[in-house]
Amino acid sequence: MAGKRGIPHIAVDSCKGCGLCVSVCPEAVLTIDESHVNLKGYYPVTVESVENCIGCLSCALICPDVTFTIELLDDQ
Ligand code: SF4
Ligand code: SF4
């Protein structure tokens, strides 16, 4: 299948759970994980469907806390 792919890596304890990244992701890859609280006391974002990530970097660019590292993959 044509198109870019990526893997978002999240520094979970840097996240303040604001949800900005969830709102801008065009592929609904991300969600807020309400099953646990991080070291800052927030529900952190988590990767729900990594297979849908297109490596667009929108989440990394909008995050005010520099929580994301996006690994870009060669299309197979
Ligand atoms: S890189 Fe783009 S597609 Fe991948 S999780 Fe971030 S916003 Fe979503
Ligand atoms: S934008 Fe950053 S701080 Fe806000 S929920 Fe996403 S990863 Fe967490």
Image (tube, rainbow, N blue to C red):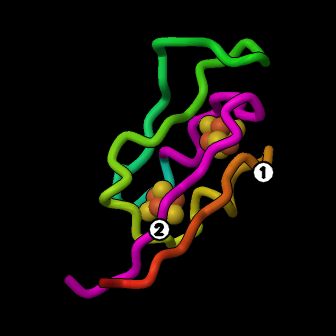
Q: Give how far across and how far down residue 21 sits, in percent.
A: 57, 48
Q: Which mark is drawn over residue 66?
A: 1
Q: Which mark is drawn over residue 20?
A: none
Q: Which residue is mark 2?
A: 6
Q: In the rendered image, which quarter is residue 54 located in? A: bottom left
In the image, the segment drawn in magenta is: 1-22
Judging depth in this view, the residue of 3 and 32 nearest the camera is: 3
N-term mark: 1 or 2: 2
Whole-Å distance between the Cαs marked 1 and 2?
A: 17 Å
Q: Is residue 75 left or right of residue 20?
A: left
Q: Is mark 2 within 8 Å of ligand 1?
A: yes
Judging depth in this view, the residue of 72 and 63 nearest the camera is: 72
Q: Is residue 58 above or below residue 4?
A: above
Q: Give how far across and how far down residue 9 sits, in percent.
A: 59, 50
Q: Residue at x 72, y 46 (%)?
A: 67
Q: Is residue 51 left or right of residue 14?
A: left
Q: Give how far across and how far down residue 69 sits, in percent.
A: 67, 58
Count of picture labels: 2
Q: Is mark 1 within 8 Å of ligand 2?
A: no
Q: Residue at x 47, y 68 (%)?
A: 6
